[in-house]
Image: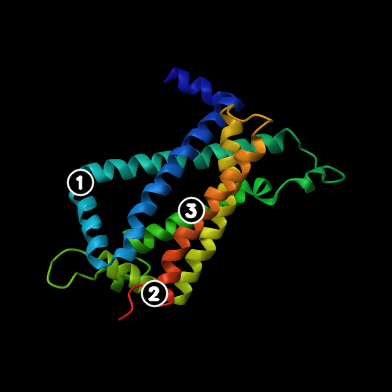
Amino acid sequence: MAGITRLLKSSIGRKFMMALTGLLLFGFLIAHLSGNLLLFKGQKALNDYAAWLASLGPLLWVARLGLLAVFAVHVLLGISLSRENRGARPAPYAFEKTVQAPLPSLWMLRTGLLVLAYVVYHLAHFTFGIVQPAGHALVEAGTQRHDVYGMVVHGFRNPVVALSYVAFLGVLGLHLWHGLASFFQTMGLSHEGYAKLIRKAAHAVTWILILAYAALPVAVLTGLVGKS
């Protein structure tokens, strides 16, 4: 515990923890996507997966709380490092010299806080059923289990809901655009000889991930999935 405290007191330590928690969250995004893509396989496939998750019982909540803790640490570290950077430059430059820096790198705190808002909205929608209670209450025909497939289709049939998700995913993409590439630099895994290749690979992975997530609301909204 004392070691972690010392680590977090240093800027380098906080950047390391920021990168590590970011990697864990990225891993969750991949795992979450693998389950969500079952939407394209139909009602049974997605509902079977959701039922399996529910069968984990307390283990599922342990995983959720652990993920929440990682996310909270990531956000708090981001705010701390942003304040530290501003404190090192209390007066603004007479001429902004960071104009050549890519936009995602300049907006990491802003996009991070917007992603936080997106997560709260997502939980209110699909986990707690606050946004669309009628869809959240759906039960699969012939069984007593929760119809997750029907809930997702019901939600994304609303153009405002579907397009809001796509917009939020764009913000997440901006955050990952810089975050993935900077992870290797923070961990000391980048090198001048292949730094450009790492950035291109990180940007490609970001595009693939965001487009895969965005395909879900777009598929429902266009009638490709869940057409009755």
Amino acid carrying mark 2 in the image: Leu
Depth-wise, is mark 1 or mark 2 nearer the camera? 2
Q: Is residue 104 left or right of residue 46?
A: right
The secondary structure type at the circle numbered 2 is: loop
Q: Is there a contact, CB below 8 Å, between mark 1 and mark 3?
A: no
Please provide percent x and percent y for residue 102. Answer: 71, 48
Residue position marked by numbered label 3 in the rendering: 209
Amino acid carrying mark 3 in the image: Leu
**Mark 1 or 2, nearer chain start:** 1
Residue position marked by numbered label 2 in the rendering: 224
Please provide percent x and percent y for residue 214. Answer: 47, 63
Amino acid carrying mark 1 in the image: Leu
Label 1 – label 2 distance at C-alpha: 32 Å
Can see residue 130?
yes
Image quarter where the C terminus lies is bottom left
* Nearer to us in this view, 206 or 72: 206
Residue position marked by numbered label 1 in the rendering: 56
**Mark 3 or 2, nearer chain start:** 3
